[in-house]
Image: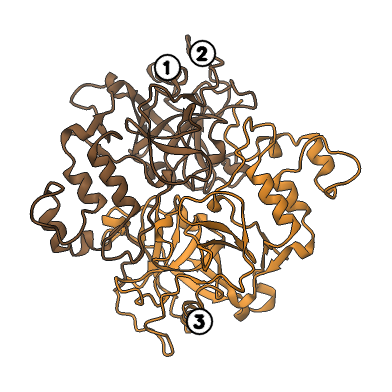
Chain colours: A brown, B orange
Amino acid sequence: MYHACMDNPLRFALPPLAALLFAGAPLGASSPPARPLSSTDIVAAAPADAWVAVPPEDLLVVDLEGGQRVVIALAPGFAPVHVANIRRLVRSGWFAGITVNRVQDNYVVQWGDATEKKPLPDGIVASPPAEYARDLKGLGFRTMPYRDAYAERVGHAGGWPVASDGTFAWLPHCYGMVGAGRNLAPDTGTGAELYAVIGHGPRHLDRNIALVGRVLSGMEALSALPRGTEALGFYREGTPRPAIVAARLASDMPAAERPAFELMRADSQSFADWLTARANRKDDFFIRPAGAIDICNALPPVRAKG
Amino acid sequence: MYHACMDNPLRFALPPLAALLFAGAPLGASSPPARPLSSTDIVAAAPADAWVAVPPEDLLVVDLEGGQRVVIALAPGFAPVHVANIRRLVRSGWFAGITVNRVQDNYVVQWGDATEKKPLPDGIVASPPAEYARDLKGLGFRTMPYRDAYAERVGHAGGWPVASDGTFAWLPHCYGMVGAGRNLAPDTGTGAELYAVIGHGPRHLDRNIALVGRVLSGMEALSALPRGTEALGFYREGTPRPAIVAARLASDMPAAERPAFELMRADSQSFADWLTARANRKDDFFIRPAGAIDICNALPPVRAKG
């Protein structure tokens, strides 16, 4: 009898007639829809040119023991040296056998070499620059008209969420974003130790550590892991640690096996409509649309292809 | 070799000398500390009168099969009718045997009567008022000097996070907040179906559904549950559903068994210092303190007593 607190409580249980009728209709069609298109409708109706394919060389495919797969889009436009290191680590097979060592509730899951002794392959930049922000210029940044607690401006570029001070631009620490762990010195994170955010966006980490990507698929394989019981969520000595069986770039996989994903382009009309609809939810459940949206609730839509 | 992305990477591995020396020192002590107190130091040093005990009648103790315990502070100051319903449901034993039926990644875990046929006990208000906001007046609200994407003002009152438009005040949908599921009509949530937020704060739900409390302890028993594979994260028919063995109010438990919790008071100096320290992290890990904080990253500190 209760189906509360849903993104759209009717979408699945009992699709409203108007949504069924107008889901595929172009915006501004002559028959006025009974209700505005929902964000879900807009994603479903977005044309092919509203999407940008994640290049196969930027798609990191991580298989965990037990058969779960996590797919991460890498962000060479924001952290090129870290991403180059990660590609090299992947291609050398370094991540095979690497384990999840830390799961801190409402914060991060972190994987790396628990022995801290596994030698890095040749060609790794041992001290990459602190790739915490890049020039705003040239990014194609589109500001969203909503406040942010942390940054002067937030918005999107390509298929990425972005925060900015008007001069620099950086990826925000949102649920599902992936970063390169580091030690105290800003340049100590090679990309061999990675973390994904599994809680409310710890945005205080923005510009303090390099974000290198975003989980596009399989997030639940990380977020539902048992929390570590030691300080900072590290697993206690002797606790079984989920292991990575294989990590590959999609570009190195046989064509028939390659996963493929697309992100909605920030410069598309569909994205503008989606953002407006997300900030002003008007389905039958919502009584008072927020009229705004937090950047971490506005991560560009993802779709699997093929 | 890497211990990245920590709240305070030195706190546990190698406590900085200054923190050891000054953790218990009063602010403004004559010997100048080598570094500002961290938020952790401030919590540890907060005097007794900086804390407010959660009344035992507001402390909901939920025991899950498998032995995990979740403790929730109820919020009668925000949702009195819903909380009265919940107390009545608890005291009638209604929640025993109730199951978690929905776990949607980056959103909510929801528990209730999967059969949708279990009769509610006598005395339940079947259609409580839509307790989504209350008068700001009389709340003792203290605004924090930071922006919010959703509300004109955010801050704290008592031991609670609060959002406000200057006239009304409401609890924000942050990680760990607990609400009363409802159907489409605003007054259909009795408190028999509850949810807890397990992702980035879905603040668009603010003022659209009644929040009734906050998880103080045992959050990982909810947040690490396997995600449901059906639409909206509902568990597939036949999937084992985690069951509630017992739900009690602390006030109804024998004194020796009662858990007890305190929240830091929003009107204490310790809280003001803690908030400033959280917004301006200055330990060895942080290169660029944020200078701001999101309300969902500023939930008042909790401590177990006795």
Q: Give the quadrant of residue B55.
A: bottom right
Q: Outermost residue, left direction?
A: A30
Q: Give the quadrant of residue A215.
A: top left
Q: Mark 1 highlights which residue?
A: A84
Element carrying mark 1: helix
Q: Position of residue A189 (x, y in %)?
A: 55, 23
Give the residue displayed 65% in from the left and 56% down from the top: B301
Residue contact between numbered discs 1 and 2, judged by CB atoms under 8 Å: yes
Q: Give the quadrant of residue A246.
A: top left
Q: Nearer the viewer, mark 2 or mark 3?
A: 3
Residue contact between numbered discs 2 and 3, judged by CB atoms under 8 Å: no
How many discs mark residues in the rendered view? 3
Q: CA distance from mark 2 to mark 3?
A: 61 Å
Badge number at residue A125 = 2
Element carrying mark 2: loop
Q: Amino acid at mark 1?
A: Ala
Badge number at residue B84 = 3
A86 w.r.t. B143: above or below: above
Q: Amino acid at mark 3?
A: Ala
Residue toward you, B169 or A95: B169
- Kindly identify which chain the residue marked by label 2 belongs to: A
Sequence order check: which comes first, mark 1 or mark 2? 1
- Side (left or right) of B294 relative to A18: right
For disc 3, the neighbor class at 10 Å (few under 14, some 14 to 19, many from 20) is: some
